[in-house]
Amino acid sequence: MRELTANEITDAVAELCIRANKILPQSLECRIAACAEEEASPVGKAVFEDLKANLNAAREEDLPICQDTGMAVVFAELGQDVHITGGTLQEAVDKGVAKGYTEGFLRCSVVGDPLERVNTGNNTPAILHVTLTEGEQLRLHVCPKGFGSENMSALKMFTPAASREDIIRFVTDVIASAGSNPCPPVVVGVGIGGNFEMCTLLAKKALCRDAAVRNPKPLYAQMEQDMLTEINRLGIGPQGFGGTCTALYVNIEEGATHIAGLPVAVNVGCHVTRHAEMIL
């Protein structure tokens, strides 16, 4: 049994919140650079240059990539042989988010009640998803999520009669309806299967998967490519000014489902879909 203090977790989460908001994952930055080269529209190319300049400025000036520093989503893979001392995991994570957002001078955007709308002042509470695993490690994956893109997400409860083409059309239609709102070129996370709530979690996990990693199953890897092709035919383009790159990539995560169901969820991310990980 390995002991891990709540303070260690707090410090790690704080560091990840700051890092994720200031430095884009390398694979996503590479994807932006590649799409900038491929973009056919002169206006789209100019927008891509502005996006790349923004990333460089954030890195050089030690500033957030985007003013909306998001609601903190934390995926924790907790080894069953880890014993947390000095507080609960949720307490440690919330303290880490509070520390990271206040000490890192990141915008705090969380309200404590959805109708009363009073800002909590430190971006807590975090959204925490915990998975128990083997071993003596804690893997933390912090994914700040802005709501310009989150608001464009959707869920559809298909029946098993739905075809592959129906699913691709639904995902494409979600992005078409979103238009310029989610700050394209977007990243698209798709969840297929599970039930009502699991499907949306699959989509969130898909959104936070590395840009360079395709689904290991050929069926879904091909659907990722086909969805990307269809979305990029929409012509929305970078920041909605028109062009051949509306989405940078599409990730699909699938899960077991009921014989009577085929849920599909789309979680939309902006061109700065941010995330950072650490193993304790």
Image (tube, rainbow, N blue to C red):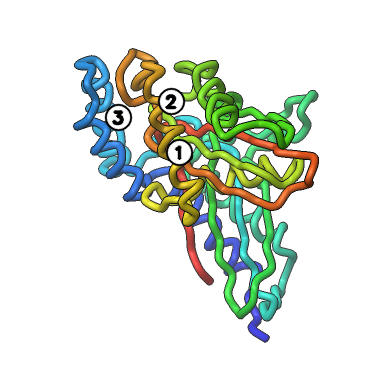
Residue 19 in view here = no
Residue where numbered disc 2 is placed: 231
Residue 259 lies in quadrant: top right
Residue 45: mark? none
Q: Is residue 55 above or below residue 185?
A: below
What residue appears at the point 61 percent right and 79 percent down from the top-left corner? Answer: 135
Q: Is residue 153 above or below residue 202?
A: above
Q: Earlier in the sequence, mark 1 or mark 3?
A: 3
In front of the other: 130 or 234: 234
Q: Is residue 129 left or right of residue 223?
A: right
Whole-angstrom CA distance, mark 1 to mark 3, is: 20 Å
Circle 1 sits on which residue?
250
Number of other residues with Cα within 10 Å of mark 2, as a class: few under 14, some 14 to 19, many 20 or more? many
Q: Are marks 3 and 2 in contact (CB under 8 Å)?
A: no
- Percent of width and height locating residue 265: 63, 35
Q: Which mark is residue 51?
A: 3
> Mark 1 or mark 3, which is nearer to you?
1
Label 3 or label 2, whichever comes before in sequence order: 3
Q: Quadrant of the N terminus?
A: bottom right
**Label 1 is placed on what type of residue?**
Val
Left or right, 265 with reference to 209: right
Q: Is residue 261 visible?
A: yes
